[in-house]
Amino acid sequence: MKSLKLLSIFALLGTLLSAKTLVFGVVPQQSPLKLVNDWQPLINRIQNETGEKVVLKIERSIPEFERNLYGGKYDIAYMNPYHYVIAHQKQGYIAKVRDSKKLTGILIVRNDSGFTDVSMLKGKKFLFPAPDAFAATLLAKYELLKRYGINIEQEKKFQYVNSHDSVYKGIARGIGDVGGGIERTFDNLSDTEAKSALKIIYRTQSYPSHPFAFKSSMPAKEQAKITKVLLALPQEMLDSLNMKQIIVTNDAEYDDVRDIVSVLSTASGKE
């Protein structure tokens, strides 16, 4: 009897040890502590409702997140549209759901700059938060090139300053002439003096928002279970994640983003 009990215990331990832990990555647009506070309740909900073991993985920087994503280190990941296009190409990640809100970039200038039209921005110094910030950097560069013939990459008069707030403060203080951002971060700027010195001169078109994407090697059954949980998140959890509603998406919805990547790669001489 004892040997049978021991065999049962070892069998149970073997099952537990062999159970795969799913790694859930989130693009680190905010501090690690805030991201853990905001996202861990979602991880707990997925575990409770699916029975899957899921661990939240927060990197210290966006470049570190990109390295892990493009290396296929996450089973599920929440990323910006540019990240998704590259991750799909490199590792076959598949977008399943996204927030219903669309992404729109803005360009801001000082109130006293004298700029009244985007065509006046050629040759001016631009500030952007990061090279691959989708709405704040890539959309701005793309539409300036396509609509106004302003090739930011070719002019090479731009600087990356790490955050949206740094962009706004930098333009207010004269470090640059034009800054890329998004309306939400501009509205939430706590530096009221800097904010009062600025105005929005341009808004980009809107594009599909950050997707939740699954690694292609993840079993379809597991993907379906987690997708079901994401589509049924309560409003209070969506609010804490700054989302409106989770809706179904697919890879084809990001084809316009692929065009942006292609155009900007050509403009920068990478192709």
Image (cartoon, rainbow, N blue to C red):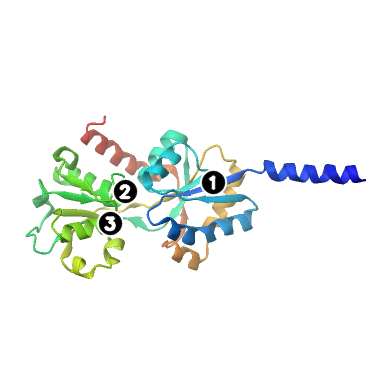
Write the residue at 21% across / 60% down.
Answer: 169
Q: In screen coordinates, is 193 left or right of 262? A: left
Q: Give the mark, 3 or 2, whose residue is nearer the N terminus.
A: 2
Count numbered badges in the picture. 3
Q: Quadrant of the C terminus?
A: top left
Q: Give the mark, 1 or 2, whose residue is nearer the N terminus.
A: 1
Task: Where is residue 197? Give x, y as percent.
Answer: 15, 66
Q: Nearer the viewer, mark 3 or mark 2?
A: 3
Task: Where is residue 193? Give x, y as percent.
Answer: 19, 69
Q: As rendered, which of 54 and 161 lies closer to the eye?
A: 161
Residue at disc 3, secondary structure: helix
Residue at disc 1, secondary structure: strand
Q: In the figure, 111 relative to 265: above or below?
A: below
Q: In the figure, 125 relative to 31: above or below?
A: above
Write the residue at 38% across / 52% down.
Answer: 209
Write the residue at 44% across / 66% down.
Answer: 239
Q: In screen coordinates, is 114 left or right of 39? A: left
Query: How packed is label 1: few (under 14 Cα within 10 Å), some, or many (20 or more)?
Result: some
Marker disc for residue 164: 3
Residue under pointer 1: 23
